[in-house]
Amino acid sequence: MGTVVALRQRMTEAFTEEQKHYLDGFVTGAGLRRGVGLPVVGQSAPAAAANSAGDIHSLAQDRFTSAGKKLASEETAKRAKDGLALWDEVMKHARDGKFPKGTDVFMFKFQGLFYVAPAQDSFMCRLRLPAGIVTSHQMRGLAELSVNFAGGYADVTTRANFQLREIGARNTINLLMGLSDIGIVSRGSGADNIRNVTASPTAGIDSQELIDTRPVAREQHHYILNHKEMYGLPRKFNIAFDGGGTIPALEDTNDIGYTAVRVSKGAEGIEPGVYFRLTLGGITGHKDFARDTGFMVKESDCVLVSHAIVNAYSEHGDRTDRKKSRLKYVLDKMGFEGFIKEVQRHLELLTKKTGDVRSNPVLIAFPLEKCDPRQAIDRMGHVGVHPQKQAGKFYVGVVLPVGRMTAAQMTGVAAISDKYGSGHVRLTVWQNLIIPDVAEKNVEAVRAEIEALGLETSASSIRAGLVACTGSAGCKFAAANTKRHAMQIAEYLEARVKVDMPLNIHLTGCHHSCAQHYIGDIGLIATKVAVGEEMLEGYHVHVGGGFGVEQGIARELQRDVLATDAPVVVERIVRAYLENRKPGEVFTEFARRLEIGEIKVLMETPALAA
């Protein structure tokens, strides 16, 4: 026990309060369960070989190993290497023309490099574009990089971000250097890190918004880049800011969601004004939206609160079972009240560490029902021409076929933005983009030049609400070629039905649900369907999902639909809606009004089945 006493003595002399908390649990667990000083079977003897001694992640890992539990292979890999310090290793792989193997495939994601074999024998590179904003200069640079070092195109993701694909083993370093040259980073855009920070796509130009979310999203982005403890979490993590404008940021699908609200009537200790409502635990692929915590946060405190939440998650997130390691499962285990207490503890530690002790509560308890109701959203506000709050200015929402742009289209959009806009574009979580600040006299010219690029701006198009993940053409997890099938569904529907109300159709390739099929009006998740001795591409079909005020998880309608039959099945669903809806009824209302069996009957009526 002398070793235990010595360690406890060192804790009182050399460590911070946060480190003492973790080490106390480690020492106690080691002394009670295994005796002191013995390595855990199945783990590397030197704990946190690459991480600095006593960091929040290695200490959290130690709590599991001291209890005799085996870390997930990804956690063991993070103990052996620092994912943010792999430049020399990536350089060597590029010089040798080699792809990573084993857990190095995971570790390379810390640099934004995803080896996507067997779908493609190449890398995908994911970027960081805070609030989805990219300058025209950057767009031209990305187009050039895609031609020189990738597949000559870029995909817009459901996190308002770009991905470059078909990157050869020898091209990684040139690509990363090229990205840095144009002011874009990819570090930490994959693996167990915080993904691209999203925000309202019309921030600063929306007459309805309560607050411009661009500054706080930008601050959050740079804070993450400059705080190492914000990397290497138990799993991936999402943060979004919604400013209360006409286009939602889908913050309720994020681990941390900040939703702008107005308090018109103050209460004791609370001034009227605009605050951010704090929501936690969104992960729609696991059928859960972020839930209101009962607290509000000032804009100036959001980044600090994010850090405290991430630290509490890093401490308590499961490091042994990847399927149960997202924030949702920590909240399920601890309860919101228990988790918030941990967040408050970490807030105190952070403010003491920085000397930024704040006189007012950072988390402000306030009933949601006393906040002003959110104004209505425009589900197709990200497509077509819309007035800005700046007099005489308009933004133009451009439909991208399943989120993909060729290098020529990227260069063309950049030129349009320079000629008619303000030299930047905004990507959206619906895999399209917005060109802001167009003068009214130039709107038709912009439309014409967009159409000349092979793109469109029509909000009535089926493609305007079409969302598809990468699919099996570029992702090893996907069970079907979602982008190809999404385009087939769109082409089939547009030739046969006319939709006069917003309709979102989401296709996702696997359980990770990157295309968020559970929140689509019609959501399809890929599967393999047995036909004789063959396993063919197919989908399970869901209906009635929604977000924001229409928040809800879609219900399963049909299973094991062959991909070749999916266009016909979706057409029957849409026709059932068009023929049986009530006046003014949107698809979500229709799908939730009826039982699944009733929808199936309507789909099979002779007129619809013909």
Image (tube, rainbow, N blue to C red):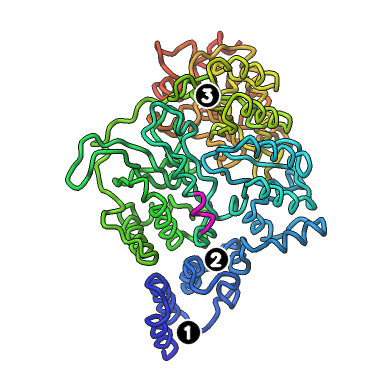
Q: Is residue 577 above or below residue 268?
A: above
Q: Residue at x 39, y 70 (%)?
A: 18
Q: Residue at x 48, y 31 (%)?
A: 202
Q: Main secondary structure of the magenta part?
A: helix
* Between discs 3 and 1, the one toward the N terminus: 1
389 or 239, which is in the foreground? 389
Amino acid identity at mark 1: Val
Residue pointed to by mark 1? 36
* Between discs 1 and 2, the one toward the N terminus: 1
Residue pointed to by mark 2? 71
Query: In this image, 151 relative to 288: left or right?
Result: right
* Residue numbers of the magenta segment: 221-226
Direction left: furthest residue? 268
Contact (CB < 8 A) between labels 1 and 2? Answer: no
Marker disc for residue 312: none
Q: Position of residue 89 (x, y in %)?
A: 72, 63
288 or 276, which is in the foreground? 276
Query: In this image, 166 relative to 291: left or right?
Result: right
> How crowded is the residue under tag 3: few (<14 C-alpha within 10 Å), some, or many (20+)?
many
* Mark 2 residue element: loop
292 or 415, which is in the foreground? 415
Q: Position of residue 580 (x, y in %)?
A: 45, 12
